[in-house]
Amino acid sequence: MTAHEATTDHPTARAVTDVLQPRNVLLVGMTGIGAAADGWSGIPWGLLAALCAGIVPAAYIEWHRKRGTWGDRHVVDRTKRLPIFLVILASIGLGSLWMILGHAPRGILYAMLALWAMTVGLLAINELWKVSVDSAVASAVPALLAVVHSPWWLLAYALTAAVCWSRVALAYHSIAQTVVGAALGAATAVPFLLA
């Protein structure tokens, strides 16, 4: 347990932030978007998207955590986040290229490009001010699912609010940092609306 965890012990918030961390949200969300894009044959594309957007970056963070570079997956120090954003951008970029070459359904490719653009926005903001990546991802996925599946997915914003609350309760972010992250995440649906 880090000193940060010891001073901000809140079991419910910890459970929410751990269960609804980006890799888990992306695994469920991108698989659903793949299925919406092309039925059962879209699911492997969704899993590839989840791998590139969520699992590879999480594995990179875990590798550094085990090496002692960062105390935990949250990388509280804003100035240490640049390599993570670069890994995310490279991973999503390579995954998108694979999708283009493999003739993936447009819907899942648009979702990948939307996440890539969101990451560019997070990186730009992070250079000046700390922003919540967890909140951005927790907002992007319901927005994308609402556009490709059904507006009923907007009800999942209750989970987005829970993620934002947990990040503040654990003192990882301010309210403003979670709101800005969530707003940027919601903007990922724009390419679908314009397509």
Image (cartoon, rainbow, N blue to C red):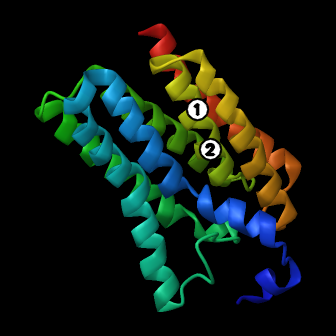
- For the residue pair 95 and 170, the one nearer the viewer reads as 170
The residue at which mark 2 appears reads as 138
Residue 49: give x, y in percent of width and height. 33, 44
Toward the left, the furthest residue is 102
Residue 192: give x, y in percent of width and height. 46, 16
Q: Of the residues shown, which amino acid type is indicated by label 1?
A: Pro
- For the residue pair 59 and 26, the one nearer the viewer reads as 26
Residue depicted at x 77% and y 42%: 161
Residue 67: give x, y in percent of width and height. 47, 90
Q: Is residue 183 above or below residue 194?
A: below
Residue 112: give x, y in percent of width and height. 38, 36
State yes or no: discs 1 and 2 in contact (Cβ < 8 Å): yes
Residue depicted at x 27% and y 37%: 43
Q: Is residue 135 above or below residue 146?
A: below
Residue depicted at x 39% and y 60%: 55
Q: Which mark is residue 63?
A: none
